[in-house]
Image (cartoon, rainbow, N blue to C red):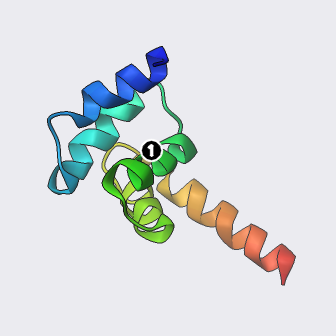
Amino acid sequence: MSSESKQINEIFSDYSLDDVEIVIQKLKEAGFSQIETVKIIRKEFEIGLSEADHCVLHSVAWKDDLQKNVKLRDDLFDHLT
């Protein structure tokens, strides 16, 4: 098992989806990016991509990046349509 996998297992061993804010904060503190956090949350809690993305995007841990990310997504969508 890789050190990253061990780190993820340690974070998730004590928490459930009800504790998603705590888990997201711990993942951020461990150095995981937003995208990595979405992937991990999705896999570990067995939830859909949209739900995992929403949890991370609107989390307290990532609140400082919310407006920047929403703008980036809107700009990308506008460019693609």
Residue 80 falls in which quadrant of the image?
bottom right
Query: Looking at this view, is 75 or 81 the one in front?
Result: 81
In this rendering, the answer to whether 1 lies above or below 79 is: above
Q: Residue at x 50, y 65 (%)?
A: 49
Image quarter (top left, top right, bottom left or bottom right) of the C terminus: bottom right
Percent position of residue 34, x then y = 51, 44
In this rendering, the answer to whether 51 lies above or below 81 is: above
Percent position of residue 17, x then y = 22, 55
Give the residue at mark 1.
40
Question: Is 3 displayed left or right of 75 in the figure?
Answer: left
Residue 13 falls in which quadrant of the image?
top left
The residue furthest front is 1
Question: Is 67 displayed left or right of 47 in the figure?
Answer: right
Q: Residues within 10 Å of mark 1 (few under 14, many from 20)?
A: some
Q: Residue at x 43, y 51 (%)?
A: 43
Percent position of residue 37, x then y = 46, 43
The residue furthest bottom is 81
